[in-house]
Amino acid sequence: MKKVVKFGGSSLASAEQFKKVGAIIRADGTRRYVVPSAPGKRFSEDTKVTDLLYTCYRAADRAKFQAVLSEIKSRYQEIIEGLDLTFSLEEDFQVIEENFQKQIGEEYAASRGEYLNGKIMAAYLGYEFVDPAEMIRFDGNGQFDAEITELLVQKRLDGVETAVVPGFYGAKENGEIKTFSRGGSDVTGSIIAGALDVELYENWTDVSGVMVTDPRIIQNPKVIDTITYRELRELSYMGATVLHEDAIFPVRKAGIPINIKNTNAPDDPGTMIVEDTCKKPPYTITGIAGKRGFCSLFIEKSMMNSEIGFGRKVLGVLEEQGISFEHIPSGIDTMTVFIHQDEFTEKEQQVISGVHRAVKPDYMELESDLALIAVVGRGMRSNRGTAARIFAALAHANVNVKMIDQGSSELNVIVGVRDEDFEPAIRAIYDIFVETQL
Ligand code: ASP
């Protein structure tokens, strides 16, 4: 049995956190491949080392450069001393400083956070340090190359009992360092787990799993025990921030579950993310997420229903303007398109005239400051009355529902509400399904 374990930045922000991580790894001999992030925030106003590295690399003058560099050095030194290691990053820092001065690349700069933390972690655990530049491959255009990477990871880690592989970056064939987008150590962990076909990918963070809803709206929301990849995708798309989006594919492809765990409460079971499960969720719904900042374009034309190509022509106008749409609820002679407000505002007049030209509507209306809320749950398909409960709760909370869309997967119900009703609506839905468990 083998596991890949990835630790996020807050789990590795200080020597004290490193010690917790060390204890977690030593407690289970199957935790053989460790993927560390760079040191994150130690307290809420702190700066992540990755951000310090970007600042340092872009520093306009020598004094600023030196000041930020020594701040970075002392972050690592503090960890090394706190762990009582007789180990020095001095040589590594010399190389980094030279490369920064040569301005060899911003992605190289950002990647050093994980690289250095990986070196400390390997020394602390007595695991082999394996540089992902050797095996996480990006092609000539800077796109991640999954196929070659899989082969390289299998080859490089073949026979390696235990290893630390820093997250977040890889390299092109010519050695140029490339990073994933922010939060990308999740992706590295998933790639290694998928390539080695391990039993489990543990993703350690600072919360005890995926929460039913946003803790900024509901204090201490319940943690989801088991969630499917599809449910997670729906929730993440609607704003839940749990894992990097690209971290799902490599493990999902290999049928490997992900366990989200809390470094600060390692005995909590966390959340299992799985392909499918017979386990019934304790509530009919699995989660609630939402996004603000939408507007709607309402279009009316009599006999629209029999006009072939009407929808295509409207969407064609959006496409021409480079605007993506979110939902299109439609009636007999009406159609509404939900669009991201920030994408739309600048081009609204072009869209209006474009739609006039394309379909000659009888009437059009714009509405702004809308929010969308997704109520997600695999349990909804087999339960009667879920929609009734959602709308009863919203009515009770005096929330006016502007739009309803039940996804064709029957995995979610999406409601559109006015921006000021966003939080009360989420609270009402959470309350009826989770608190009162009606
Ligand atoms: N250190 C990188 C970031 O801050 C990557 C990661 O932590 O996953 O985005």
Image (tube, grey):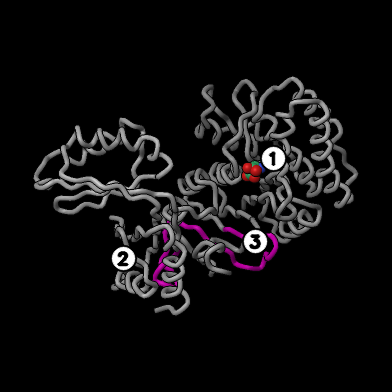
Chain-order first, disc 2 or disc 1: 1
Residue drawn at point x = 56 percent, y = 54 percent: 199
Q: Residue 141 versus residue 45: which sits nearer the camera?
A: 45
Residue 262 disc label: 3
Residue drawn at point x = 37 percent, y = 73 percent: 393
- SS for dot 3: strand
Label 2 to label 3, Cα distance in Å?
31 Å
State yes or no: Cβ of the residue under disc 1 lies below 8 Å from any atom of ligand 1: yes
Judge from the rendering whether residue 49 lies leftward or rightward of residue 349; answer left or right: right
Q: Nearer the viewer, mark 3 or mark 1?
A: 1
Residue 332 percent coordinates (x, y):
14, 53
Looking at the rendering, the stretch of residues picked out in magenta corresponds to 260-287
Residues at circles 2 and 1 in contact by the CB criterion of under 8 Å: no
Q: Is residue 346 magenta?
A: no
Q: Is residue 265 magenta?
A: yes
Residue type beneath disc 2: Arg
